[in-house]
Amino acid sequence: MDLPTSHPAFAAHFTDAIYEDNSLETAPFGSDEGADLLQEWGERREELTRASRLTDVLGFDAGDLEELLGRLDGINQLDEVGSVRSAGFVLLRLVGHLDTPDREIVLRCLDFEITTTSDPGWLSQDARDELVPPLHQQREDLLSWENPAQ
Protein backbone atom coordinates (compact mmCIF):
# COMPACT_ATOMS: atom_id res chain seq x y z
CA MET A 1 0.00 0.00 0.00
CA ASP A 2 1.31 3.43 -0.91
CA LEU A 3 0.96 5.94 1.89
CA PRO A 4 -0.78 9.25 1.16
CA THR A 5 1.50 12.20 0.49
CA SER A 6 2.72 13.90 3.65
CA HIS A 7 2.00 17.49 4.55
CA PRO A 8 5.28 19.42 4.05
CA ALA A 9 5.57 20.23 7.76
CA PHE A 10 5.22 16.55 8.64
CA ALA A 11 7.75 15.50 6.00
CA ALA A 12 10.28 18.04 7.27
CA HIS A 13 10.09 16.96 10.91
CA PHE A 14 9.15 13.28 10.96
CA THR A 15 12.02 11.94 8.89
CA ASP A 16 12.65 8.49 10.42
CA ALA A 17 11.83 5.51 8.18
CA ILE A 18 9.09 4.38 10.59
CA TYR A 19 6.82 7.12 9.24
CA GLU A 20 6.80 5.35 5.87
CA ASP A 21 6.64 1.83 7.30
CA ASN A 22 3.30 0.10 6.88
CA SER A 23 4.33 -3.29 8.27
CA LEU A 24 5.90 -2.76 11.72
CA GLU A 25 3.15 -2.98 14.33
CA THR A 26 4.47 -0.06 16.40
CA ALA A 27 5.06 2.26 13.44
CA PRO A 28 2.29 4.89 13.20
CA PHE A 29 0.73 3.26 10.14
CA GLY A 30 2.01 -0.31 10.51
CA SER A 31 -0.81 -1.85 12.48
CA ASP A 32 -4.03 -2.81 10.73
CA GLU A 33 -5.83 -0.04 12.61
CA GLY A 34 -3.22 2.59 11.79
CA ALA A 35 -3.07 1.60 8.12
CA ASP A 36 -6.86 1.66 7.86
CA LEU A 37 -7.13 5.09 9.48
CA LEU A 38 -4.48 6.56 7.19
CA GLN A 39 -6.02 5.01 4.08
CA GLU A 40 -9.54 6.17 4.97
CA TRP A 41 -8.53 9.72 5.83
CA GLY A 42 -6.10 9.91 2.93
CA GLU A 43 -9.14 9.44 0.69
CA ARG A 44 -11.14 12.00 2.71
CA ARG A 45 -8.27 14.41 3.30
CA GLU A 46 -10.29 17.48 2.26
CA GLU A 47 -12.54 16.91 5.32
CA LEU A 48 -9.64 17.47 7.72
CA THR A 49 -8.57 20.93 8.88
CA ARG A 50 -6.32 22.37 11.55
CA ALA A 51 -9.39 22.24 13.81
CA SER A 52 -9.76 18.46 13.39
CA ARG A 53 -9.28 16.40 16.53
CA LEU A 54 -8.44 12.83 17.44
CA THR A 55 -12.11 12.19 18.09
CA ASP A 56 -12.92 13.21 14.49
CA VAL A 57 -10.39 10.79 13.02
CA LEU A 58 -11.40 7.97 15.35
CA GLY A 59 -15.16 8.51 15.13
CA PHE A 60 -15.23 8.68 18.95
CA ASP A 61 -16.96 11.16 21.13
CA ALA A 62 -14.94 12.80 23.89
CA GLY A 63 -16.49 10.49 26.50
CA ASP A 64 -15.32 7.37 24.64
CA LEU A 65 -11.78 8.69 24.53
CA GLU A 66 -11.82 9.66 28.22
CA GLU A 67 -13.18 6.22 29.12
CA LEU A 68 -10.37 4.52 27.21
CA LEU A 69 -7.74 6.70 28.85
CA GLY A 70 -9.26 5.96 32.25
CA ARG A 71 -8.81 2.20 31.94
CA LEU A 72 -5.22 1.85 30.78
CA ASP A 73 -4.10 -1.16 32.77
CA GLY A 74 -2.48 -3.79 30.58
CA ILE A 75 -2.05 -5.42 27.21
CA ASN A 76 -5.80 -5.53 26.54
CA GLN A 77 -5.81 -1.85 25.63
CA LEU A 78 -2.74 -1.87 23.34
CA ASP A 79 -4.76 -2.04 20.10
CA GLU A 80 -7.09 0.78 21.15
CA VAL A 81 -4.23 2.95 22.39
CA GLY A 82 -2.32 2.22 19.19
CA SER A 83 -5.32 3.48 17.22
CA VAL A 84 -5.31 6.74 19.19
CA ARG A 85 -1.58 7.14 18.56
CA SER A 86 -2.07 6.43 14.86
CA ALA A 87 -4.92 8.97 14.68
CA GLY A 88 -2.58 11.64 15.99
CA PHE A 89 -0.03 10.82 13.33
CA VAL A 90 -2.77 10.76 10.67
CA LEU A 91 -3.56 14.36 11.57
CA LEU A 92 0.09 15.29 11.54
CA ARG A 93 0.76 13.55 8.22
CA LEU A 94 -2.32 14.84 6.39
CA VAL A 95 -2.89 18.27 7.97
CA GLY A 96 0.50 19.10 9.50
CA HIS A 97 -1.17 19.97 12.80
CA LEU A 98 -2.02 18.40 16.15
CA ASP A 99 -3.46 20.60 18.87
CA THR A 100 -1.92 20.63 22.35
CA PRO A 101 -4.59 18.59 24.19
CA ASP A 102 -4.49 15.88 21.50
CA ARG A 103 -0.70 15.91 21.53
CA GLU A 104 -0.78 15.26 25.28
CA ILE A 105 -3.19 12.35 24.73
CA VAL A 106 -0.94 10.82 22.07
CA LEU A 107 2.08 11.21 24.37
CA ARG A 108 0.13 9.53 27.17
CA CYS A 109 -0.71 6.66 24.82
CA LEU A 110 2.93 6.35 23.75
CA ASP A 111 4.04 6.23 27.39
CA PHE A 112 1.51 3.48 28.07
CA GLU A 113 2.62 1.51 25.01
CA ILE A 114 6.31 1.87 25.90
CA THR A 115 5.74 0.73 29.48
CA THR A 116 3.46 -2.15 28.55
CA THR A 117 5.50 -3.36 25.57
CA SER A 118 8.71 -3.20 27.61
CA ASP A 119 7.26 -5.64 30.19
CA PRO A 120 9.37 -8.81 30.01
CA GLY A 121 6.46 -10.86 31.33
CA TRP A 122 4.74 -11.24 28.00
CA LEU A 123 7.18 -10.42 25.19
CA SER A 124 10.50 -11.94 24.30
CA GLN A 125 13.59 -9.74 24.33
CA ASP A 126 13.77 -9.96 20.53
CA ALA A 127 10.18 -8.74 20.21
CA ARG A 128 10.81 -5.89 22.66
CA ASP A 129 13.96 -4.94 20.74
CA GLU A 130 11.87 -4.65 17.56
CA LEU A 131 8.73 -3.00 18.92
CA VAL A 132 9.88 -0.54 21.60
CA PRO A 133 12.45 1.64 19.76
CA PRO A 134 9.90 2.95 17.18
CA LEU A 135 7.65 4.01 20.06
CA HIS A 136 10.52 5.94 21.65
CA GLN A 137 11.28 7.57 18.28
CA GLN A 138 7.68 8.72 17.88
CA ARG A 139 7.67 10.08 21.44
CA GLU A 140 10.90 12.02 20.91
CA ASP A 141 9.72 13.40 17.58
CA LEU A 142 6.34 14.40 18.99
CA LEU A 143 7.94 16.10 21.99
CA SER A 144 10.10 18.22 19.68
CA TRP A 145 7.23 19.01 17.26
CA GLU A 146 5.96 22.57 17.04
CA ASN A 147 2.88 23.27 14.97
CA PRO A 148 3.76 25.64 12.15
CA ALA A 149 2.03 28.99 12.13
CA GLN A 150 -0.76 29.18 9.57
Image (cartoon, rainbow, N blue to C red):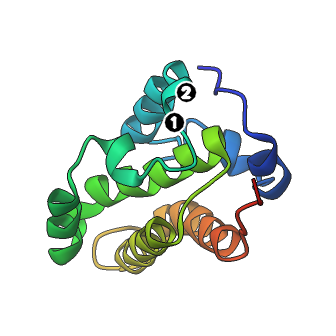
Please provide percent x and percent y for residue 103.
Answer: 51, 68
Q: Is 135 placed left or right of 121 in the picture?
A: right
Closest to the observer, 109 or 17? 109
Identify the residue under disc 2: 45
- Which residue is denoted by mark 1 in the rendering? 48
Q: Is residue 46 left or right of residue 59?
A: right
**Where does the image place residue 38, in percent across and percent down from the top left?**
50, 33
Name the one closer to the observer, 33 or 56: 56
Point out the residue furthest to the right here.
12
How far is mark 1 from mark 2, CA to CA?
6 Å
How far across and down, in percent of the image, does residue 17 sit?
A: 75, 48
Q: Is residue 82 above or below residue 47?
A: below
Residue found 62% across the figure and 50% down from its top: 92
Comparing 29 with 42, the one in front is 42
- Amino acid under label 1? Leu
Quarter of the image for residue 57 reads top left
Q: Secondary structure at mark 1?
A: loop
Q: Is residue 55 left or right of residue 75?
A: right
Mark number, residue 142: none
Residues tagged 1 and 2 counted as in contact (Cβ below 8 A):
yes
- Could you tell me which residue is drawn at 32 percent across and 44 percent down? 58
Report which quarter residue 123 is drawn in: bottom left
- Residue occupying the far front of the picture: 150
Residue 76 in sight: no
Visible residue check, residue 19: yes
Residue 39, above or below 31: above
